[in-house]
Amino acid sequence: MGSMRIDLHTHSTVSDGTDSPAELVAVAAAAGLDVVALTDHDTTAGWEEATAALPAGLTLVPGAELSCVSEHDPGRGISVHLLGYLFDPAATAIVTEQRRLRVERRERLYAMARGMAADGLPIDADELLSLLPPDSPAGRPHLAQALIRAGLVTTVDQAFAEYLGSGRGYYVPRHDTPVEDAIEMIAAAGGVTVFAHPLARSRGRVVSIETIVKLAEHGLTGIEVDHPNHEKADRELLRDLARQLGLVQTGSSDYHGTNKMIPIGAETTDPEQLEALLDKASGAQIAVG
Ligand code: AMP
Ligand code: FE
Ligand code: FE
Ligand code: ZN
């Protein structure tokens, strides 16, 4: 079992990835993965398609990446992404909050696109929204693609650096879920929670270690230690912290198809750590292909 390859964080076209859920599980199998988790932003809409398309020998861990905010550290709230796994996708609190966030994601993306149009950039906000499936979790990568189509940038990363980042003039914030509420919501629905890329400094401000300790006391199950946006020293720090706090440690690619340059399986999770996650979850089943 030591050779099992496990990637616990990926995105499909259901949110801001570029592979459909069916394509994503095929890509995972082709990359030699044994286990993949589908963790689209603020939706569970891809679970069914991914399960139905599961190639023989591949196991699917159903999940989602929840857009959250932490108010523990001084200053304004810090954006936190929380991976929820194996929760009951029909739990009312989760369904309601995810739907609210998907609506706000569209309004926010529309506002950002309108801001660009107002400055004379060739971006049509109404056209942008009309291209996105109804009730899908619209994200800045979709606006990045519009900027590419308009010839203003050539890559998603350039779009973030010049137009979409939180320090740029077109950025519009969202009202994300308080992270403690999200941890409680997922736990109440039988799921487990992993703090996604907690020290991804390139994304913006990150929480303090004290905040991670508080979230662990609040029922957080694990932390994503190995992530493409984590520096080596931060990985060591997070590994030690997880050991001290008894948190599960994961490693994942955060694959987004061609919206990011990282291949699926670029970072992986130890089988014992996955076992620890599965042992604590009861809200949904893994699917075995
Ligand atoms: P949003 O969900 O609208 O806040 O947009 C953030 C999403 O953009 C995240 O899921 C990231 O995975 C994705 N993304 C792609 N490239 C970048 C980048 N260079 N910087 C920040 N986020 C990025
Ligand atoms: Fe994303
Ligand atoms: Fe994330
Ligand atoms: Zn992600």
Image (tube, helix red, strand yellow):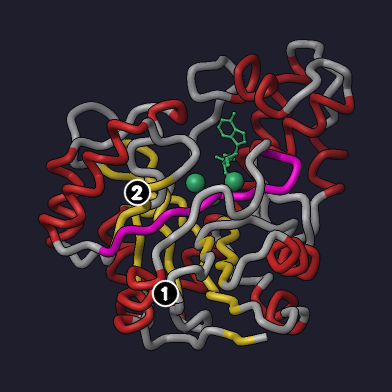
Residue 258, percent from left and from top: 75, 41
Amino acid at circle 2:
Val
Taking the spot 70% from the left edge, 58% from the top edge, the residue there is 12
Residue placed at 18% from the left, 44% from the top? 211
Label 1 is placed on what type of residue?
Ala
Residue 130 vs residue 115: left or right? Answer: right
Mark 2–mark 1 distance (CA, rounded to whole Å): 28 Å
Q: Is residue 87 magenta?
A: no
**270 in relation to 130, above or below:** below
Q: Sort mark 1 into few (<14), some (14-19) or many (20+) by Cα contacts within 10 Å.
A: some
Q: Secondary structure at mark 1?
A: helix
Above or below, 206 against 171 in this view is below
Mark linked to residue 49: none
Q: Quadrant of residue 27?
A: bottom right
Tell me where residue 172 sits by quadrant.
top right
Which residue is outermost to the front?
2
Task: Tell me, yes or no, if residue 104 can be seen here.
Answer: no
Ligand 3 under 8 Å from disc 2 Cβ = no
SS of the residue under disc 2 = strand
Q: Nearer the viewer, mark 2 or mark 1?
A: 2
Mark closest to the chain's N terminus, 2 or 1: 1
Instruction: Say whether residue 248 is left or right of residue 274.
Output: left
For disc 1, the marked residue is 93
* Image: magenta residue range: 248-260
How many residues crowd mark 2 within 10 Å: few (<14), some (14–19), many (20+)? many
User: Of residues 238 and 270, which is closer to you in this image?
Assistant: 270
Residue 117 in the image, given as x and y percentages of width and height: 78, 20
Residues at discs 2 and 1 in contact (Cβ within 8 Å): no
Q: Position of residue 179 (x, y in %)?
A: 31, 54
Q: Report the front residue among 59 and 65.
A: 59
Residue 225: which disc? 2
